[in-house]
Image (tube, rainbow, N blue to C red):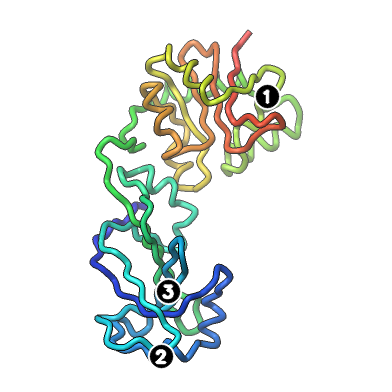
Amino acid sequence: MRLKVVEIEDILIVGIEVDLDFDWDEFFEAPNPILSKIADVVEDNTFYYVADAEKSIFGRRVHLITQIPEGCVVVTVPSGTYARLHKSQSTYEHDMFAMTNYESIEKVEFRTITPRLEHSAVEYLFRPVEYLQDAINIRKIPVLSKELSLQLREHYINKFFDVKSNCVKDYFYKRYITQGKGYLWNFIKDEKKAGLTVSEVWDFFNEKEEILFFWDSTSSIGREFTRNKVFKLNAIQLLQSYTRFAFDLYIFDTTLTWTVIFQHEEDDEGYKCFLIKSN
């Protein structure tokens, strides 16, 4: 599944202001007649939802502004480059962006909603993006050979994690491996980990050059891409860009004498990053 990027000209939308609790499913069951009074509509059966910092608009796209029905307002979606995401792709979104050089930017995003008889509405999100030549594209990160990756991952997990000490851990680890549920950091040997601040992480990696790593993915497309792989990259480059593709990250080198682990949840002491050194 690949990210679809499109170029869009200015879009004029006439509609009504709505709040954050607005439910367009309910709207389609009992439509507001004011929207039927909008003239010069471009698409007969497609509605637009536009949200910015000031207001949210639900309405219709028009060719030009001839008259504005009472109670309606006008908003313009600016021209530019947009990622077009079907509603069903929301669970893959992070991985889809990571496999490109596109980044989301702070501009107006919008949705199109096309209701259908006896079916749920067809919904797309259009998110403004820009292309960055130097952004990390995970398709282009060097990968160790399959044999070496498998060997290193096995040694790494046995070294720093407790995955089989009892039947409960064994069950959850098998589920993590086979179904991608949970995170590897759930099995950290707690007695060995030391929390790190952001500045301490940078200090630790200042003395490192190329490092090895892999990460937990939450979508099926991401898990398939990372399955049994070990990647390598310059340490500082990774630190600058890892949130592009991961929040749960495992970093080490071939000595397996240390690992730095990032997780998306804070522990009881407020840390999200940990250093573990082997005895």
| Label 3 Cα crowd, 10 Å radius (few <14 / some 14-19 / many 20+) | many
In-image side of 83 versus 190 (left or right): left
Residue type highlighted by circle 2: Ser
Residue that label 1 marks:
162
In-image side of 82 versus 204 (left or right): left
Q: How many marks?
A: 3
Residue 245 location in percent, x, y?
43, 39
Residue 243 falls in which quadrant of the image?
A: top left
Residue 54 location in percent, x, y?
46, 64
Indicate which label's residue lies in the foreground, 1 or 3.
3
Residue 155 location in percent, x, y?
55, 18
First of labels 2, 3 by sequence position: 2
Above or below, comparing residue 194 to residue 163 in the picture: above
Indicate which label's residue lies in the foreground, 1 or 2.
2
Q: Nearer the viewer, residue 259 or 172?
A: 259
Q: CA distance from mark 2 to mark 3?
A: 16 Å
Above or below, comparing residue 264 to residue 54 in the picture: above
Residue at position x 45%, y 85% in the image: 71
Q: CA distance from mark 1 to mark 3?
A: 48 Å
Residue at position x 54%, y 11% in the image: 257
Residue that label 3 marks:
113
Above or below, comparing residue 163 to residue 92 in the picture: above
Q: Nearer the viewer, residue 129 or 114?
A: 129
| Label 1 Cα crowd, 10 Å radius (few <14 / some 14-19 / many 20+) | some
Above or below, comparing residue 40 to residue 53 in the picture: below
First of labels 1, 3 by sequence position: 3
Residue that label 2 marks:
36
In-image side of 185 versus 122 (left or right): right
Residue type highlighted by circle 1: Asp
Q: Are marks 2 and 3 in contact (CB under 8 Å)?
A: no
First of labels 1, 2 by sequence position: 2
